[in-house]
Amino acid sequence: MSRQDSVADTAAKPIARQRKPSSAGTAAPMDYVLDEQVGFLMRRAQQRHIAIFQRIMGDDGPTPTQFAAMSKLSAGEEISQNLLGRMTAMDPATIKGVIARLEERGLVERLPDPDDQRRVRVRLSAKGHEAIPGLLEKAKAISAATLAPLSREEAERLLALLARLD
Amino acid sequence: MSRQDSVADTAAKPIARQRKPSSAGTAAPMDYVLDEQVGFLMRRAQQRHIAIFQRIMGDDGPTPTQFAAMSKLSAGEEISQNLLGRMTAMDPATIKGVIARLEERGLVERLPDPDDQRRVRVRLSAKGHEAIPGLLEKAKAISAATLAPLSREEAERLLALLARLD
DNA sequence: GCATTTTCATTTGTATACTAACAATAATTG
DNA sequence: CAATTATTGTTAGTATACAAATGAAAATGC
């Protein structure tokens, strides 16, 4: 294997899913199997998704949150930093770092809002705009690859169920 | 609202889900709606889950990954650090930090493996063992609360679908 | 119109999570 | 057995992600 032993491939499948006959006397084992819990399953599905994301976007591509911000900005309007955070499900501290890194790479620009001195308006730079079509193409491939193990109907069902856990 | 404007509650629902008539001339908008992509939906579902986790476990409770490690160790056996990482879907660098923080809090112990000088064996401390029953109780409540918006059948379906995205 | 509250952005601190590079030790193979 | 390869654990660096606290500015209420 070329890439390091990342969790996403090498140790992908959990090793010990055995469900002991509840014998040994270490307190009450209870019927709790970590590998069957929502949180654990979601974490692992996310790890796989992020690995796919990085593979398809490439080494100099945006991270998932960076792309989310760019995607929302691609509509063309200037948006305040915090509002952009809400639109992409990032809190103010998180969106700040994401925008700062996008700005370092020349993909977005920050400018003061003339109407509200607290606000910082964020928008795509010309370079950012140029990147959008290619990124959207890759983003579609990422979603498809992530859902590849499922049929169309199953994928639709999963998305609908996930949307209800908001 | 008492807690800061965290994404998990205040800005929970995406704001702009409007699907413009593909008018404006900023390149090709393509039919890509961030809010409908697997990655985005999983990220938001995870954010909500983690918020529930922290609320139920409490301020001095373990984090999700810390609990995952403790849960696997509760079987009673000593496990090498890397193997424990594979069992809980964490790479070596990540499990190291998790175990270090559990050790600082006196919940796990690290000891050299007599048969393999590279290995570090990890096990629950007495204090860690005592904490397990209460933590398992809370962990079940966390899974239930996370899945609360869904019916039994829907929850089962979601878990089955997530398990296939591994 | 002024005090209270809210919003916006920032900073600091903690915890994941991964890549990459490394050293030490085991296991394998010629 | 010696050389190669693999495994284990560590360190350093980057990027999320959130809590909590702060200061500045805007909105609200009375």
Image (tube, coloured by chain):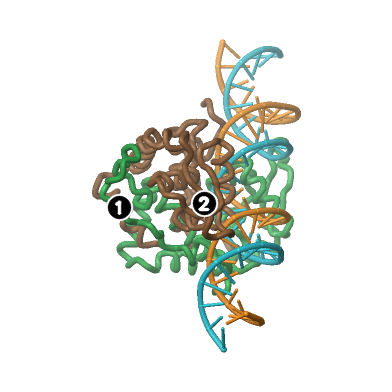
Chain colours: A green, B brown, C cyan, D orange
Screen quadrant of the C terminus of chain B:
bottom left
* Residue at image mark 2: B121
Front: mark 2 or 1 = 2
- Residue nearest the viewer, comparing A82 with B116: B116
Is residue B56 rendered to the left or right of residue A113? Answer: left
Choose top left, top right, bottom left or bottom right for residue A30. Answer: top left
Q: Residue at x 52, y 51 (%)?
A: B121
Please tell me whether residue B50 is drawn above or below residue A158 in the rendered image.
Answer: above
Amino acid at pointer 1: Arg
Residue found farthest to the left: B153
Q: Position of residue A113 (x, y in %)?
A: 71, 41
- Residue nearest the viewer, comparing A125 with C29: C29
- Residue nearest the viewer, comparing A122 with A1: A1
Is residue C16 rendered to the left or right of residue D2? Answer: left
Is residue A94 rendered to the left or right of residue A46? Answer: right
Q: Position of residue A41 (x, y in %)?
A: 40, 53
Pointer 1: residues within 10 angstroms few (<14), some, or many (20+)?
few
Q: Does the rendering let one see residue B31?
A: no
Q: Are marks 2 and 1 in contact (CB under 8 Å)?
A: no
* Residue at image mark 1: A19
Give the chain letter at badge 1.
A
Disc marking residue A88: none
Q: Secondary structure at mark 2?
A: strand
Amino acid at pointer 2: Arg
Q: Residue at x 29, y 48 (%)?
A: B155
Q: Does the rendering let one see residue A132?
A: yes
Q: Residue at x 58, y 59 (%)?
A: B117
Mark 2 to mark 1: distance in Å? 22 Å
